[in-house]
Amino acid sequence: MPFATCISVQDTAASIAFYEGLGFAVDSTMARPGDDIHMLLYQGDFCGLLYSNADLKQWLPTLADTPISLAGMLYLTVDDFDGFHDRVARSTEVIKGPLTDDVGQRVFYFRDPDGYVIGIHDNAAFRASELGRYAQPEPPTRTARRRRSPVRSSVLY
């Protein structure tokens, strides 16, 4: 089972608008007063959760003194790397890349409104790189599923 990322955000409405502007969808059916949590999806596939920082600190009081953001990166792989890069660049600053790293992966990085650094990898280059052995297997055929997301979570480092 892969890790599911839950990111703490200052303003869920602003974060939802930011991610929807990048082509993500947000399912807020579980959100309620005191538990402002939203499922983040890309073309129907789950990517993670957006959780109000105030509500998260109530849920897990041990996080009460932890600032928003993290020392690290979140990674996604996409099928349409150039198209996704262009969409991100129209919405926010690309802080590094696009570039090809030392193992052959195409990557670029940006920050979301709460300071999380998100790295985007080209799925084809990721699979062809030495890290490709850690990739989830491709489905037998792309037409076998009604909709296949071009974004996949990746744990790389």
Image (cartoon, helix red, strand yellow):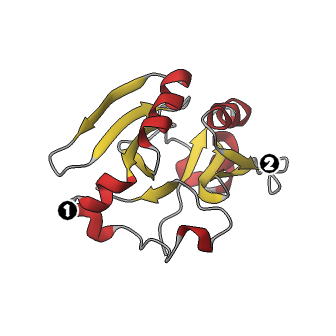
Observer-nearest of 155 and 108? 108
Residue beneath the point at 44% across and 71% down: 138
Callout 1: SS = helix
Amino acid type assigned to the residue bearing label 2 in the image: Gly
Q: Position of residue 47 (x, y in %)?
A: 57, 55
Observer-nearest of 49 and 10? 49
Q: Position of residue 58 (x, y in %)?
A: 68, 50
Observer-nearest of 91 and 80? 80
Q: Kindly indicate whether the residue at mark 1 contacts the one at mark 2 (C-beta within 8 angstroms).
A: no
**15 displayed left or right of 2:** right
Residue beneath the point at 80% across and 48% down: 34
Residue beneath the point at 41% across and 70% down: 136
Q: Which mark is residue 118?
A: none
Amino acid type assigned to the residue bearing label 1 in the image: Glu
**15 displayed left or right of 88:** right
Q: Which residue is mark 2?
A: 34
Q: Which residue is mark 1?
A: 130
Name the image quarter holding the C terminus.
bottom left
Q: Position of residue 2 (x, y in %)?
A: 47, 69
Which residue occupies the extreme left position in the image?
Answer: 102
Residue beneath the point at 31% across and 61% down: 127
